[in-house]
Amino acid sequence: AYFAGNNWAKTMEAADRAVANPGVELIGDGHKGLKETAFESSMIAAQNTNNVDKVISYGEKLLAVNPNQLNAMITVSAAIMTKLPTGAAEKTAALDKAEGLAKKALAGVDAMVAAANAQTKGQLEQIQGNLHSTLGLVAYNRPDYMKSIQEYQLAIQKTPKDGLEHFYLGLDY
C-alpha cells in the first residue's frame, strides 16, 4: 500500500521490517519471494527519494537474493557512477563493480531485444543506450578515453537525443 501511494519512506521501513522476519523466503507472489519483492520496492523507493546510498544498498541486497535481477543491475551500475569513492583502491573497486553489472545487464537486454516486438524493442534500445552510457562513464573515469568514446558512440546510436552522452563524448576528445 505504501509503494502504490508513493510513500517512499514507509515503503523502505515496511520492507526492512518484513525481511527481518524468519521464513520470509517462503512467502511471495509465486515468482518472487518476499525478500526480492521488498528489496526491489525499497530500491525503487530510494531512487525516488534520491538516496544513492540506499539505492546501492537495497540493490546489492536484491542482487544477493537474485543475482540475475536485471533492474537491480541496471540501477546499481548507474547509481555507483553518481557517487564514486575518492580513494584509488575503492574507486577502482566501484568502477569494476559498475562495469561488471552494466555488462551483465547489457547481455541480458541484448538477448531480450532479439525476441522483442517493435514497441518493446524501442524501450529496450533506450536501456541499451543507458547501459552503454554507464560503461562510457566507467571508461572515462579509468581514464580509458578510447573505450569511453566507443561506448558513448554506441549509446548515442541508441539514444541520440540524450545530451549527457554528447557532453561526455566531447570531453573524451
Image (cartoon, rainbow, N blue to C red):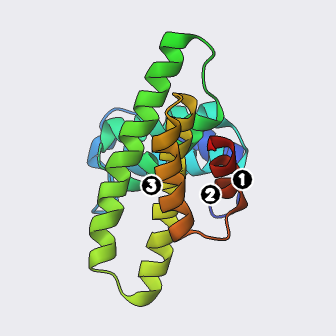
- Residue position marked by numbered label 3 in the rendering: 71
Say what amino acid the circle numbered 2 marks: Phe
Taking the spot 70% from the left edge, 59% from the top edge, the residue there is 6
Q: Residues within 10 Å of mark 1 (few under 14, many from 20)?
A: some
Taking the spot 33% from the left edge, 35% from the top edge, the residue there is 64
Say what amino acid the circle numbered 3 marks: Asn
- Nearer the viewer's eye, disc 3 or disc 2? 3
Q: Secondary structure at mark 1?
A: loop
Say what amino acid the circle numbered 1 marks: Asn
Mark before the other along the chain sequence, 3 or 1: 1
Q: Is residue 23 above or below residue 152?
A: above
Q: Residue 7 shows which numbered tag?
A: 1
Q: Is residue 20 visible?
A: no
- Residue position marked by numbered label 2 in the rendering: 3
Q: Percent x, y for residue 166?
A: 67, 57
Q: Is residue 73 above or below residue 128?
A: above
Q: Secondary structure at mark 2?
A: loop
Which is nearer the eye, 7 or 24? 7
Q: Is residue 24 visible?
A: yes
Which is nearer the eye, 48 or 41? 48
Mark 3–mark 1 distance (CA, rounded to whole Å): 21 Å
